[in-house]
Image (cartoon, coloured by chain):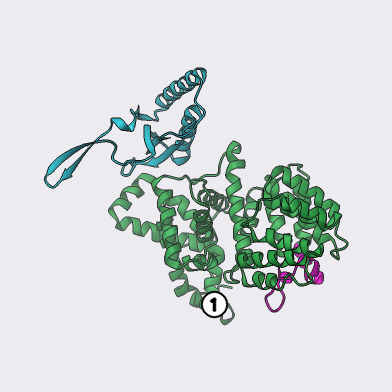
Amino acid sequence: MAHYLLSVHSVEGEIREPMTDEERAQSHKQLGVLEQELKSAGAWVASGRLHDPATATVVRMAGDEVLTTDGPFVESKEHLGGFYIIQAEDLDAALGWASRVTEAIRTPIEVRPFAGFEA
Amino acid sequence: MHDGDAAARLDEAEVGWIFRQEAGRSLAALISAFGDIDLAEDAVQEAFTVALHRWPGDGLPPNPGGWITTTAHNRAIDRLRRERRGRQLLGQMAVLAPGDDEPGMLQEVGLMQDERLRLIFTCCHPALSTQAQVALTLRLLGGLSTKEVARSFLVAEPTMARRLVRAKHKIKAAKIPYRVPEAHELADRLRPVLAVVYLVYNAGLSGPADPDLCAEAIRLARILAALMPDEPEVAGLLALLLLTESRRASRLAPDGSLVVLGEQDRTRWDRALITEGQAILRRCLRRNQPGPYQLQAAINAVHTDATTIQETDWSQIVALYDQLLAVAPTPVVALNRAIAIGELQGPAAALALVEELDLDSYYPYHATRADLLGRLGRHNEAATAYQRAAAMAPTDAERAFLRLGGRASRSPNR
């Protein structure tokens, strides 16, 4: 088994056709079903949705002191909107789950293996 | 052959040649057994060193492929036993004991062919870039050295080495599986495999003569066709390559310049390849699932049927291009269809179609325009278009051809 991070990438200000209420409800329902399936298949490790990047705070070392600053670490138009951590037999299995997520939310998903999680 | 008499003695070049013919299967078998490309490559390389040492004196073993697999397998196990992590791995996978040095282990043909098929689907996995797919396929299935792969794509060896290392690292880290896709995914997953083989062939047409990528592509296509006899597009690709190959020798003049289809010496076309290609094509077309490779092969088959360019059945070719455009609606297909229509209805009809296409960065587009303009007597415009085409052409032969304004040429042979 390998572990994968499925990260949901949003592009700020990207002109996408906004979902209708009905589509949004449909999308939520699909995600709910999917999450249940992930769990019953033993693939789910963790998942979460993030607030927008304006809510982020960065701490870093400045000399010997920890400095706290406002804002995301990288000013960029693309940001992480949410993630799943899953375990899967191989990349094809992980891509299968990722395809289901992107079908439900219509946003690109990056699939990346964890290092040192080999079982 | 292996009793060590003088006639059976091999020199190093012969050992190298035989080894390369046989090593692809062994490499695939080892990658499959150990799940580690680097380990498998190193082990096969070590087996080669042993072969260089032993074969010239002892003669060729009765089953060179089995010998390579067994020897490399033993070397890989030796190496794993030396490393702590390797011992853990060995414990987990319960590798079959290879017995002794006798060939006999892992040599069941069906099994090994299956492993090459798995490996090509790994090499051509859609999670890898096309560049990486091509390089891995040539390295791991073609048995080309990194140097040869680099030379065939005109990149520096360290660049190619990095590309291969990165691709192999991704296969391992992301766990790209070694498996033949299931029936419902096969159509999607087969597409990049066939595209890679076709790319290798075309790189051979316009690239350096050594290594012979055209021969390598045909070898790969033959393996695929043998392993997937029920896939008409696989057979279609093999037919396309054989029919294109039948004309390869007549494509270039002795001075290396390009000879267009209409001016090629058709007596130099290879009849054996044509017969074989057409027979394969007929068999796969009977399944009635035409795809882009079968249709391109069919177009080539019509050309190889004609004893002169004038005798070519252009209406048949246009009909095939109509079908091809329906399944592969690309501007390049539309360009070739326009050329065929030009042969049927004249250059004005073709030019009208060509002018609608958005192919400014594709040099055959300018070459085709130049030719059509010339045939319509618009010589100044034709000259400008030839210059543009020549400036973009990838090989000396093609540049020279286009600088000459295509001579008495018609359309380029593409």
Quadrant in the rendering for residue B223: bottom right
Which residue is rendered at x = 63% and y = 61% of the image?
A: B202
Asked whether the viewer can see residue B104, the reply is no
Residue A32 in the image: state x and y as whole percent: 43, 21
Q: Residue furthest front?
A: B380
Q: Residue furthest left?
A: A64
Which residue is rendered at x = 62% and y = 51% of the image?
A: B194
Residue B395 in the image: state x and y as whole percent: 61, 69
Is B249 covered by the magenta stretch?
A: yes
Span colored in magenta:
B248-273
Tell me the shade of chain A.
cyan
Looking at the rendered image, the quarter that the C terminus of chain A falls into is top left
Which residue is rendered at x = 46% and y = 63% of the image?
A: B160
Looking at this view, is B31 or B285 the one in front? B285
Q: Amino acid at mark 1?
A: Leu
Query: Relative to B286, is A106 above or below?
Result: above
Looking at this view, is B17 or B87 the one in front? B17
Query: Relative to B386, is B188 above or below?
Result: above
Number of residues whose C-alpha sits closer than 10 Å to that of mark 1, classed few (under 14), some (14–19) or many (20 or more):
some
Q: What is the tally of numbered marks visible in this picture? A: 1
Q: Which residue is mark 1?
A: B10
Is B270 covered by the magenta stretch?
A: yes
Tell me the shade of chain B.
green
Looking at this view, is B107 or B291 the one in front? B291
Residue A93 in the image: state x and y as whole percent: 46, 36
Looking at this view, is B161 or B360 the one in front? B360
Q: Of helix, strand and loop, which one carries label 1?
A: loop
Residue B95 in the image: state x and y as whole percent: 41, 49
